[in-house]
């Protein structure tokens, strides 16, 4: 049997897969089993932040794999401590909890927010069209009913406010609200960008009511929007930050960061993770984020992001569509879902990889190492098929 038959026979059908299998990658390109080259403008859904087979990632994997892969969190772990200290050094947070994925990071944030509760507060406000994960708690926090179907009832304590609507947000808050969770760019919701004034109003209101502000940076963190954390572009300092995807450059790792006054409520026995922050994942992550933060890559993300958005907007205008996003998380909003699916399929036929966000937006998230000529190559193909 080939890979397609093996997958269909032996793996649960939770993914709608395209009929292609890749066997190697280099930079912004992937190569299938027949040797065909594909331009990767999805980066494993914002995971392969340094592209494929980057020397920094390969070196870190080789070095740590020869030393130690895993020990339990019952012991002190040097690589984990180094990564945690670096994350707190470059963020507004003071402490870190490590896990394996974005859903786990958000799950940890939800649990921490409830532990922090005062006067028995437990409710959390999230946004309509948000996405926070597929565990029962993070699914309940996700403001898209299509993800809830079949799993009802959702967990109690979650409500959904209109994104960028401060009055609607206030109407969702009551005396049992302990936190709000926000994505600065709704990746799965359609590449919807938060308004800075809206974020500032929500943040100030939360501060006045002793409500925790949780920043879901699972998709927007690690340089994707042009700053290491996207909250830096919105003039606030979240109480809790969640990270994953690009954090390991392709190696699974997640993290929940918090300020001391909140982090202190995670005490012995309140939470845990068998694999979270093991030596291997931590060492690779440390080398990835240190390179991103200290190599000048973020300046390039801003420069190329502006160029990409300007060119994409021109194409959108010519075709009665709209471009949205910031940095290197961009989207082209089509007239309907059928058009979006058709465009993704046509680009795949031209050996260009993109994704879908929401019902009708085509999503572009190239590796941060992308060059101007790669963007030009992509846009040329996009124009030819649109």
Image (spheres, rainbow, N blue to C red):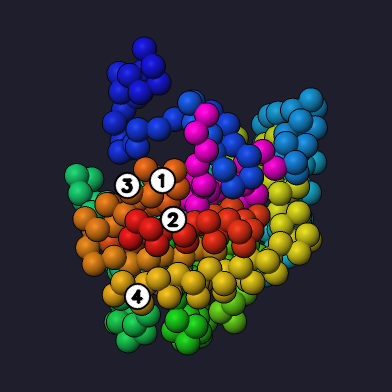
Instruction: Name which residue lies at 71% across and 49% down.
Output: 288
Query: What residue sits 28% from the left and 61% below the top?
Result: 360
Residue 71 at least partly seen: no
Which residue was labeled with disc 3? 345
Number of the label disc, if any, that sits on residue 20: none
> Label 1, on which residue?
350
Compute the Cα span from label 4 to label 2. 15 Å
Report whether residue 366 is seen: yes
Task: Tell me if residue 69 comes above or below residue 360 in the rendering.
Answer: above
Residue at image mark 4 = 318
Q: Provide residue 67's location: percent of width, then percent of height.
A: 80, 27
Image quadrant in which you'd find residue 1 = top left
Q: Secondary structure at mark 3?
A: helix
Q: Marks 1 and 2, Cα distance to the nearest angstrom?
A: 7 Å
Circle nearer the viewer, 3 or 2: 2
Q: Which residue is mark 2?
A: 381
Tell me the magenta residue range. 35-54
Is label 4 in contact with label 2 (beta carbons under 8 Å)?
Answer: no
Pointers 1 and 2 in contact (C-beta within 8 Å): yes
For discs 4 and 3, the disc positioned in front in the rendered view:
4
Give the Cα distance between marks 4 and 1: 21 Å
Question: Disc 4 or 3, which lies upstream in sequence?
Answer: 4
């Amino acid at each position: 049997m080939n890979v397609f038959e093996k997958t269909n026979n032996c793996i649960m059908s939770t993914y709608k897969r395209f009929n292609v299998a890749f066997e190697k990658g280099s930079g912004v390109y992937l190569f299938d089993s027949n040797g065909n080259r594909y331009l990767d403008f999805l980066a494993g859904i914002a995971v392969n932040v340094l592209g494929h087979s980057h020397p920094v990632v390969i070196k870190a994997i080789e070095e740590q794999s020869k030393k130690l892969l895993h020990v339990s969190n019952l012991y002190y772990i040097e690589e984990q401590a180094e990564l945690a200290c670096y994350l707190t050094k470059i963020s507004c947070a003071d402490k870190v909890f490590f896990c394996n994925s974005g859903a786990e990071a958000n799950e940890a944030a939800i649990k921490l927010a409830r532990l922090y509760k005062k006067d028995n507060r437990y409710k959390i406000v999230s946004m309509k069209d948000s996405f926070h994960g597929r565990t029962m708690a993070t699914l309940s926090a996700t403001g898209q009913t299509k993800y809830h179907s079949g799993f009802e009832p959702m967990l109690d304590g979650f409500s959904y406010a209109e994104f960028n609507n401060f009055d609607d947000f206030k109407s969702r808050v009551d005396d049992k609200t302990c936190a709000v969770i926000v994505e600065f760019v709704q990746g799965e919701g359609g590449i919807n960008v938060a308004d800075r004034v809206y974020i500032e109003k929500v943040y100030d209101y939360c501060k006045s009511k002793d409500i925790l502000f949780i920043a879901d940076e699972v998709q927007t963190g690690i340089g994707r929007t042009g700053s290491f954390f996207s909250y830096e572009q919105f003039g606030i300092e979240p109480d809790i930050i969640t990270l994953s995807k690009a954090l390991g450059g392709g190696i699974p790792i997640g993290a929940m960061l918090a300020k001391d006054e909140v982090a202190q409520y995670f005490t012995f026995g309140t939470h845990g993770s068998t694999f979270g922050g093991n030596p291997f994942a931590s060492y690779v992550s440390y080398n990835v984020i240190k390179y991103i933060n200290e190599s000048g890559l973020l300046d390039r993300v801003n420069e190329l992001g502006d160029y990409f958005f300007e060119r994409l907007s021109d194409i959108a205008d010519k075709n009665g569509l709209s471009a949205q996003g910031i940095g290197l998380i961009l989207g082209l909003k089509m007239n309907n879902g059928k058009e979006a699916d058709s465009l993704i399929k046509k680009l795949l036929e031209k050996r260009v990889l993109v994704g879908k966000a929401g019902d009708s937006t085509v999503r572009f998230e190239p590796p941060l190492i992308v060059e101007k000529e790669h963007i030009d190559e992509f846009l040329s193909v996009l124009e030819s098929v649109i």
